[in-house]
Image (cartoon, rainbow, N blue to C red):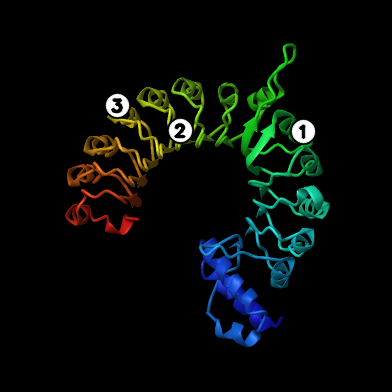
Amino acid sequence: MSDEVLSLLKRQLALYPHDLERRGEYYRVLVRMGRNEAKAIQFAASHGDPVAQLALGPNRTGERIKSDADLALLQDLAMPLPYLDLRDCIRISGTGLAYLKGLEVKSLDLSGLDRFYNDETIVNVLRSFALDSLGLWGCEYFGRQEIELFKDLPIERLDLSKRRIRATDIISMVHSGLDPTDLATQLFNRGPSDNEPDPLIHYLESSKLRKLDLSNTEEDLRLFLEALPAKSLESLTLKRCNSLSEEDLRFLVPLSLKHLDLAFCHNVMDEGVAFLRELPLQSLSLEGCSNLTNIAFKNLASLPLQELNLWRCTGVDDETLLVLGHLPLRKLNLWGCDKITDVGLSYLKDCPLEDLNLGGCRKVTSKALRALDIERLLK
């Protein structure tokens, strides 16, 4: 490939430094061109900064990188590519990943790739990277044997969600030297014996975790919550944990959580939210928690919240916004809160909002939006 085409690709990717999906689309265009330089040059744009991030997983149309040969083009770039998203690129192998050597990849997402069980080359190639973040969401065949192959790697963020992880696998991970501070997984506990403490509970109590995602965890959830590391944990996601009860939320009180996600936890009621009022929360998601009323929202009044997601919280009304209007909110999602009127919206005039979602709020008029001068924020 000529220097001219390489320069073109670098410029195209650099036009959107924060839009990973758009950058991935430009890369796909060049792949479809089959390295036809005449067509590629017609696809020109001028200026750019160094390429830093690229998403090659499925875009809006479901298109994705399909083969190892597609990754070979990245090797020609011969420039740092710290963040690379290869979600659901299911046909790539260790041979394709080997093309990434020398690109200084630090964060790699291989979610949906189920080839670890028969392609040891993949793991060997990954060991050659200085990764600090690895996404393996839904990699069903990534288990204890594969964890051992990552021995002593300095990975800080590990995403194993959509895969049930047994206690023994977690302990194997720790013993191998893989001890992330950011862990996403669907835990599955083998249960303690009568004579021995549960190793998974012991791990949670003594871990250095700062961010933990237990989405969709059902079994023994209360045991896990009791064992959360109070000193280090800053972010907790319990999305779609249907076994989570109001009483379980009391185990969060000793924590110093700044970020909490309780989306679609349908058993969370007003009394449960009261346990959150002493936490130093900066962001909170109650998305889809449709049983909440203003009794719950009043417990948020003293929190230093900057981000709040109340998507489809049908109990939200103008009285709710009167409470929220005193918070330092920068991002607020009120999609589907159809009881809100112009009166309620006026209560937000003192919030330093930068992002506001009023989708489905049919009683809010353009007059109220103009009065607040926030039309530019709407989604």
Amino acid tagged 3 = Ile
**Closest to the observer, 181 or 225:** 225
Q: Which mark is residue 172?
A: 1
Badge nearest the viewer, 3 or 2: 2
Task: Tell which circle, 1 or 3, labels the residue nearer the N-terminal end.
Answer: 1
Q: Is residue 234 left or right of residue 373?
A: right
Q: Residue at x 66, y 78 (%)?
A: 6
Task: Note whether 40 is above or below 199 in the view shown.
Answer: below
Circle 3 Cα neighbour tier, 10 Å, few/some/many (<14 / 14–19 / ≥20): some
Q: Quadrant of the N terminus?
A: bottom right
Q: Which residue is under mark 2?
A: 265
Q: Quadrant of the C terminus?
A: bottom left
Determine if residue 360 is in view.
Answer: yes
Task: Tell which circle, 2 or 1, labels the residue nearer the N-terminal end.
Answer: 1
Q: Which mark is residue 295?
A: 3
Task: Note whether 84 is above or below 303 in the view shown.
Answer: below
Q: Is residue 365 left or right of residue 66?
A: left
